[in-house]
Amino acid sequence: MTTNMFSETAMSRYLTLKTALESFHCLPDQLDDSERNRLAQMVVRQQQIQQAILASDESSRVHISFQTVTEALQTLASRFESGSEFDALLAQYQLDRVALRQVLEYELLCDTTLEYVARHASELSDTEAEAYYFQNQAKFSQPERRETSHILITINDEFIENTPTAALTRCTEIRKQANQHNFALLALRHSECPTALNEGKLGLVSQGQLHPPLDRALFKMAQGDISHPIETDIGMHLLYCQRIVAAHRVSFAAAKTQIKQKHQQREKARLQKRWIQQLMIAA
């Protein structure tokens, strides 16, 4: 299966947009000259690999359903607030949904072909997985972690309620009300951090992950404690130490599935890379 000139042009535009977002975290027209040159080289290489994959015998042995392509297109569109916003971005890069559907089909066909090529990737036996576990025990050691939530009152002199004095007063009043049962609700009502939408949850935190004043305070707290106001350069914080997970080593039983999965992922990647290299040499 080979792409025609129209689809090659559409694929180049699609890959330019996708690669810029994934590798440079911005739109192509926001790159400087050096980055644009790197992007162009990356896109050319990706297209060469895609064309070699699509022309392979293995590609003719796999099939992509109409529904699979439809779902991929819907997933991309769902990342935008509206269909018109999605269409506007496509139009900016001389694409539309018809062209995008075609390039997505080719992309999915490449991905499925690579999965087919790696279908015989070796799996670790339980004995081999266990040997890996005991030979690499440092990888399975977890430091102490603390399940933490917080409330932030920002400091901003432009607003009366957010001057340093006002922020401290507000944070102190919230602290007087706070307990283990209502901290989530108070975070939802009062916190000025985006985590407020998730009840102030920071998740499991290891030492050194938070801003130093917060880090020092958190790792002196007992389980269930709520801190007094802590000042940082962005505002006043309250921390709630919900749970302390002691430093420990993950057991082999808990790690076995992950060990096997990672091994098979590495094996698949090795087989796919070797196969692509052979394709490119032949081309």
Image (cartoon, rainbow, N blue to C red):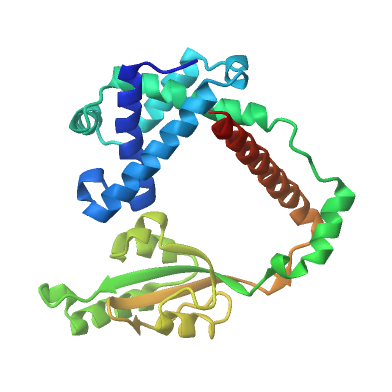
In the image, residue 151 above or below residue 95: below
In the image, residue 282 above or below residue 250: above
In the image, residue 125 above or below residue 230: above
Image quadrant in which you'd find residue 56: top right
Identify the residue shown where x is 33% and y is 31%.
Answer: 12
Report the side of 158 relative to 97 (left or right): left
* Number of numbered markers: 0
Image quadrant in which you'd find residue 133: bottom right
Report the side of 245 relative to 217 (left or right): right
Identify the residue shown where x is 48% and y is 65%.
Answer: 181
Foreground of the two, 102 or 179: 102
Image coordinates for residue 222, horizontal then vertical, percent: 57, 81
Question: Taking the image as drawn, is residue 20 in sight?
Answer: no
Image coordinates for residue 92, horizontal then vertical, percent: 18, 33
Image coordinates for residue 65, horizontal then vertical, percent: 51, 15
Identify the residue shown where x is 41% and y is 25%.
Answer: 104
Question: Taking the image as drawn, is residue 240 in sight?
Answer: yes
Image quadrant in which you'd find residue 235: bottom left
Identify the residue shown where x is 37% and y is 73%.
Answer: 177
In the image, residue 266 above or below residue 217: above
Image coordinates for residue 59, horizontal then vertical, percent: 58, 20
Foreground of the two, 180 or 278: 278
Foreground of the two, 247 or 193: 247
Report the side of 36 relative to 46 (left or right): left
